[in-house]
Image: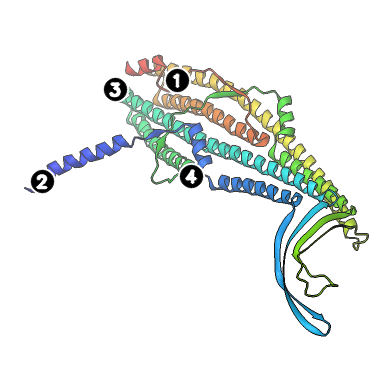
Amino acid sequence: MKVQFFIPTLWVGLLVAGSAIAANPVSVLTLDEAKRIAVAQNPEIAAIEKAREESKMARKRVTSAFLPRLGLGAGIDNELAQGGAGTSPLYFAYGQWNLFRGFQDSYQVKMADIEVDKRSLQYEKAKFRLGLDVEAQYYLYVFKTLAESLKNEAWDLNEKHKKLARIRKASGLLSESDLMEYDLRDSLLQSDIASLRQEEQQAKTALKTLMGSDPLHSDFKVEAKIGHWHVTEPLENLLTRAREENESVLVARKDLGIAEMESKQSNAKWWPEINLEAQAGKIPYADRYLSNETTFRGNILARWELFSGFDTIWQKRESELKRQKLEKQLKAAEVASISNTEIAWQRIKAIEARVHLEERNEVRAQKYYTTVINEYRRGVRNSTDVKVAAEALYDASLRRESFKYEFLNEKILLERTLSGPVLMENKPEGEKSLKKDHPAIEGVLKS
């Protein structure tokens, strides 16, 4: 009875599990989708966006200086009239309007505008930087996946070599130690595959975390490949962009603009201040007592501060020194951006050349491997020669992919310096697998 009950229950469980798997397939994650998810869920980006909104509110607040201030006042007035005490309620409406403050308010609005532009700039650049972080981690995951795949192909070739070795040993053409050599390589390859698989999972988890996903409850796979890219944008154009688009340079320019407005604002304190004031209601006067009249009074008051204890002079000099300091910082940011751009460009060009060389090395390694296998079948080569040729083929394939991956890293560093993308093109190339697209190798092994 227990067995009869267990079997249908097992089938039901398998059906439910199969339905759940079908309903929640592992999705294929593209680079653009990974960037979009990261920007939408990253808390740092959200904080920078709030800072941008905060600067917009501050800009609206400073414009309130151009509008009048209106209000109501109420109280009790105690006065002595002809030796007697009198009490009278007070209530009135009042208004104040600043007519002129030496253009201080205008400069304050301009500073607020520059601050808004600066925060908006930082918000856009922060999203771009996060996208580069995602791209770097994404291609690290792709590279680790590719490295594991190449190592698996190397292991598969070693299994085929063992089959050939067993046939030759049965014919008395190989010794036991030759066969043991393949067994040793098999064990080493499996150890390397386990290590690469762990590194692949670590890269995947780091990518999930960067995207703001729960590493334990979200899964995906990638089908991207590392292309043979070249930077096509000329160095002169990149150096110009380094001076005009680098985030540090642009922020330094915004800070310098604010400092220049502060310097002009300090000059405005030498001008007089003119205010318009008005009151209407029951207002006390110095020469009236307990008046029940509703009165109105207004005045235009001009104040010109002739001496402020040198505060205005020191503030002017302080703002000028700050402006000069920011000019030097801007120059330093431009020099650093231009220098880093040129260095990154030189590295990229060197890597591009090495990728071409590694492609040739891989072709040579494939030819060498095919030749060694043929000579092995004729008894000219031994098992050690086959192992060395297979290792050379794997190393050549991995080196080519490593340099293509290194190019992407250098490209990302260049884009970090420029704070923007660079123009590239993908060079056409065929897929050069250890097994696929090489019928000569596969044909020799099957024979």
Q: Quadrant of the C terminus?
A: top left
Q: Residue at x 57, y 24 (%)?
A: 229
Name the secondary structure under disc 2.
Answer: helix
Name the secondary structure under disc 4.
Answer: loop
Q: Which amino acid does the dot numbered 4 rest on? A: Gly
- Where in the figure is residue 32, as x and y percent of width and height? 51, 32
Q: Residue at x 39, y 46 (%)?
A: 216
Q: Which amino acid does the dot numbered 1 rest on? A: Tyr
Residue position for label 3: 167
Question: Which-is-in-front pick, marks 1 and 2?
Answer: 2
Disc on the earlier residue, 4 or 3: 3
Q: Disc 4 to disc 1, how far (Cα)?
A: 46 Å
Q: Residue furthest right?
A: 306
Q: Which mark is residue 5?
A: 2
How busy is the neighbourhood of tag 1: few (under 14 within 10 Å), some, or many (20 plus)? many
Pick whichever, 351 or 240, lies toward us: 240
Residue position for label 4: 212
Q: Which mark is residue 369?
A: 1
- Where in the figure is residue 174, as x and y percent of width and height? 33, 25
Pick whichever, 350 or 285, lies toward us: 285
Disc on the earlier residue, 4 or 2: 2
Q: Residue at x 80, y 53 (%)?
A: 98
